Image (tube, helix red, strand yellow):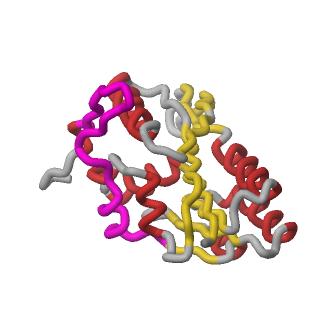
Amino acid sequence: MERVIAYIDGFNLYFGLKSKGWKRYYWLNQQILVQNLLKPQQELVLTKYFTARISGPADKQKRQTIYVEALNTLSDFRIYYGKYQNIPRQCDRCGFEDEVPNEKMTDVNIAVELLSDAFEDRYETAFLISADSDLVPPINRIRTLFPRKKVIVAFPPDRFSKELDKYANASFTMGRAKIAKSLFPPEVRKADGYVLKCPERWKPSEKR
């Protein structure tokens, strides 16, 4: 079997789902998603998920916390955190100045893990879910130093990068059917018995 490690750019995937209006798929089991995208001869040995704790309204923080706790119930699954940094912003019309939070470090964290796992020979194929072109340099280096290893890019919905498409061994855009088959059940039980429930705003409805 061909060993696969998955590297998931959490916010890139989230904003792809958001731009498509697919809120009903936010309660996504990232590990099952990858397994549904792999070929029969490929074996998922580890999933690495990259995100950052949001600094927004309390209700959004709560939903993210519930989701991260659900992800933490998965085996062979690791979460890597970046951070938010406030970036100055000025209105072109009125000159009003404020700050907006900007997620940092995810691309660096992914690059480090991609290269480290390649050097330690932990995979034959790296499976990357992202459309961030900043990840071209580590992909290019992996293909140069380890020509027998492959990097496959799965673009999130409504996301694409010509640069990643050019340098990856192969790429494709995830379809709705695969995503729809990869959700957590409505309730997820933690090891201590506590039950996590899909946030109400993420549940399917005719309006969503």
Vertical relation: 176 (above or below) 169: above
Q: Position of residue 89 (x, y in %)?
A: 58, 33
Could you tell me which residue is drawn at 42 percent across and 66 percent down?
A: 36
- The reply to whether the magenta stretch includes residue 153 is no
Could you tell me which residue is drawn at 48 percent across and 26 percent down?
A: 55
Q: Front-most of 77 and 104? A: 77
Q: Front-most of 189 and 97? A: 189
Relative to 146, 206 lies left or right: left
Relative to 162, 116 lies left or right: right
Q: What are the residue bounds of the magenta stretch?
A: 173-199
Q: Position of residue 62 (x, y in %)?
A: 36, 27
Could you tell me which residue is drawn at 19 percent across and 51 percent down?
A: 204
- The reply to whether the magenta stretch includes residue 183 is yes
Q: Front-most of 23 and 181? A: 181
Could you tell me which residue is drawn at 80 percent across and 54 percent down?
A: 120
Q: Position of residue 173 (x, y in %)?
A: 48, 71
